Image (cartoon, helix red, strand yellow):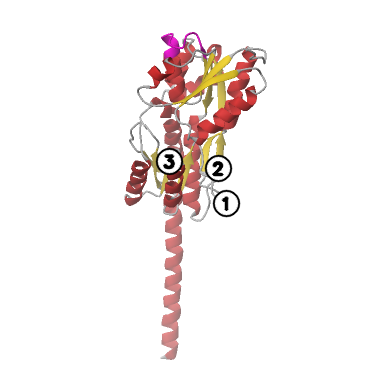
Amino acid sequence: MKNNSKKIFILTEAVLAVLVIVTAIAMAGEWNGQKRGRVSVIVRNSDNSQWSAFKYGLRMAAEDLEMEMFVVSTAEQMSVEEQEELIQWEIDNHVDAVIVQPLPGEEAARMLESVGDQIPLMLLEYGIPKEAGENGLPVVGPDHEAMGRALAEELLKDYQGDLQGKTLGILAESEESEAVRNREKGFLDAIEGKGGTVLWSLYEGGETRDQILAGQEETDFVIALDNASLISAGASSSSNDLHGALVYGIGNSTEAVYYLDVGSVECLVVPDEFSMGYESLNEVAEKLSSFSGTMENQTVSYTVIRREMIFTEENQELLFAMNQ
């Protein structure tokens, strides 16, 4: 009797061991097979053309990695409460991770840090630092300070490194944005001691920005530090509302390239939005497939484009991605 009980016990243990192995294989198959996870992407004004290359990169990564990816439809303006509700809605609908463009400000930072305890979050464009010695949430984006420096270097090249007697105006959507602050720092550090004078800095978005821009003191140059600002400056330059000021800026849309092409913008610095989309989803896939792994920060490149360089062979992929 005792032998039979012992045999039954051993057999039961063997069956349980086999079930554990089968379950592990099934789980591995789920992550390495056709569905590795469901990921939602939340960016402001998601239907705007500035996100075309970014969304193309997401789609290519989703195809390569066999993941489900959804870009949430959003408006041009978004409050912290609205962004939190969108993220929570996606969590409630059982997504495995969220890729999100942070809103500026400390309130948004606190909200994202809190949400990051519930679900893997990958940030876009710029990160949210934690206390000294701790890592913040992972981020995929360009080196904003380096882009600001590159823009300044192009301006300095055009004037042999001497801006003596020249005046500048700086245009951006939000002074609170870490991306804008770093771009502005990079630009101003690069022109320091070169003789140029910044007469005004305008941080304004919305429908009235063009009128406000046209009412600013006349300058020799307008420096636009984001895509929306670049388009506003390009349009104002086209209608001669900048009184002859030359526009240098950072942008990543077909509209930005258009204003460069027609001569309303002198120089354009373009972040690699395709790679930002691809790498953000790739990092999330690595996190989900390893169960306990961490996502790493990724820095994407940027390209400096002049009017005569728009249609060169090396820029064809960039233009193609913008038109997807």
The residue located at (54%, 15%) in the rendering is: 221
Cβ–Cβ below 8 Å for labels 3 and 1?
no
Name the spot of residue 65 as percent of width and height, x first: 46, 42
On residue 100, the disc is 3
> Which quadrant of the view contains residue 234?
top left
The residue located at (53%, 32%) in the rendering is: 181
Name the spot of residue 229 as percent of width and height, x first: 45, 23
Image vertical order of residue 209 relative to residue 76, above or below: above
Residue type indicated by callout 3: Val
> Which quadrant of the view contains residue 48?
top left
| Magenta-tinted stretch | 236-246
On residue 134, the disc is 1
Q: Nearer the viewer, residue 76 or 100?
A: 76
Residue type indicated by callout 2: Asn
The residue where tag 2 is placed is 297
Name the spot of residue 103 as percent of width and height, x first: 43, 38
Q: CA distance from mark 2 to mark 3?
A: 14 Å
Depth check, mark 2 against mark 1: the one in front is 1
Q: CA distance from mark 3 to mark 1?
A: 21 Å
Residue 243 sits inside the magenta stretch: yes
Residue type indicated by callout 1: Glu
Q: Main secondary structure of the magenta part?
A: loop
